[in-house]
Image: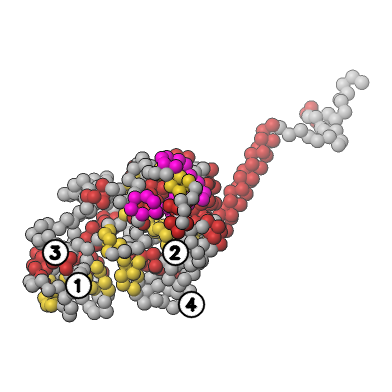
Amino acid sequence: MSGSHKAGAGRGGEDRAAPGRRRQRSPLRIAAAIAVAILVLLIAGAGWIYIQLNGNINTFDADGVSKDRPKAATAGQNVLVIGSDSRAGDNSSLGGGKGDVGRSDTAFLLHVYADSKHAVGVSIPRDSLVDIPPCKLPDGTWTKPQSNAMFNSAFSVGNTAQGNPACSQNTVEKLTGLRVDHTVVVDFAGFSRMTSAVGGVQVCLPKDVYQGDLNPNRGSRGKLLFAKGQQTVSGQQALDYVRLRHGIGDGSDIGRIQRQQAFVSSLIKKVKGQGFSPTTLLPLANAATKSMTVDPGLGSADKLLSFAMSMKDIDLHNTKFITLPWRYQGARVAIVHPDADTLWAALRADRTLDGKDASGTSGGKASPGASAGSTAPAPDSGKGINVAVYNGTTVKGLAGRAADTLKAGGFTVTSTATAGSQDHATTVIKYGRGKQDQARTVARLFPGAELKTTTAPGISVTLGQDYATAPSPSTPTPTALAAGIADKARSADDDPCSNLSYG
């Protein structure tokens, strides 16, 4: 019929779908729906990843951290990194020893400068003789302070499989005068997983290495573990590399520290080369957090990834590694306090190893009077510091000689006398409560002296044979970081085959 409408035609000429027929959606609506679905999946996936990472992370009891701590820095961060060689749990299959008591196999303090463009890791030899302050035991009681104890024994206080990170943190704060903002413990299993997550790390060996080099108690050379030269390692092989001590150089822990620094440098270079992206960081974070214990301040995936991202602008060349100034004292390692204290003072002042201001407030200029290899301004004045001096040797006039040196530095000498015994080999500086910083200032004039706490008030110096045979006090005492220490610093972009072994 003329003028009739087709079935389904509505007003205005709009087509109506026939009964049982779906209305077709526009491509724009379909694309929007897909985008929303993808977004939901991404958010859900990210949420699952963060839940997984959060579930991996273990934190230690912050109640074990000392209440008597250095002041917090206004900017910059200090992170204590501890490698634990406990053989408990997943670590039991990775070899290297017996027992499930947590031990600190390696440790370094990472100082991230306030300008977020520089960082330095200071390795602390495990056999270093230090003062260990009171530490909390698993039953809630606190230990008595220890003097002249090995640094790695702090981590074992309490004899637990997880170790005592808070005790190590307290010890580092006492040693350095720096507030440790975060502490991270990574065990064997976590280290092995991390190296695999990044696809291996490039290392270098100065000679062929066999099983007998890794374990000298084996009784035979065994099979070849590493061929001489550069190679990429991961998993168990990477762990063997950083644990290797015998058969290279002088077989010392100091030599191993330098190879560990080279390894961490290569790991940083690998991660930065892959880019600070979720595809790089998340697998690495997942591997690390499975065997990681951190302080509560880093106890979530958000906090850990945020900290990692805060370092993305630090150039490889501006990421340095050095070893705490040291000397052998028998089978142990003594800290050379004048040099070490100058280093800690430089970090407190946010000054780099070459004396530049990296606080982010003055454009990174070198400090007045600083020269290449210098790390900090001149030492603190002795003004207002009272010191009693005792001669612990049979060398006549030694107390008077030290007193003159102290007076020339602005110190007040309250008395000079002969010590109770005259067989002291090493000079000892004792200080009472609240006098730690002043004692460190005194120690600048007595290279190699031991610092010890005492219940008596004030500060005393008992001179040892080392002072009697030291150069004349007319010879200026170096106040900047010894050039050799700065010169041996490793940058993260250094050749992996350079400076691998002490001795």
Q: Secondary structure at mark 3?
A: loop
In three-dimensional space, the C-alpha distance between marks 3 and 4, rounded to whole angstroms, equals 48 Å
Q: Closer to the N terminus: mark 1 or mark 4?
A: 4
Q: Closer to the N terminus: mark 4 or mark 2?
A: 2
From what the image shows, is residue 326 above or below residue 115? below
Residue 231 among magenta residues: yes
Quadrant of the snapshot with the N terminus: top right
Residue 186 among magenta residues: no
The residue closer to the viewer here, 101 or 24, is 101
Do the residues under discs 4 and 2 have CB atoms within 8 angstroms? no
Of discs 4 and 2, which sits in the foreground?
2
- Which residue bears the numbered disc 4? 139
Q: Closer to the N terminus: mark 3 or mark 1?
A: 1
Image coloring type: secondary structure
Q: Secondary structure at mark 1?
A: loop
- Which residue bears the numbered disc 2? 103
Residue 218: percent from the left, percent from the top?
A: 47, 57
Q: Closer to the N terminus: mark 3 or mark 2?
A: 2
Which circle marks residue 424 in the picture?
1
Which circle marks residue 469 in the picture?
3
From what the image shows, is residue 178 above or below residue 258? below
Amino acid type at mark 3: Thr
Of discs 3 and 4, which sits in the foreground?
3
Do the residues under discs 3 and 4 have CB atoms within 8 angstroms? no
* Lateral position of residue 421 relative to residue 47, left or right: left
Residue 485: percent from the left, percent from the top?
A: 26, 51
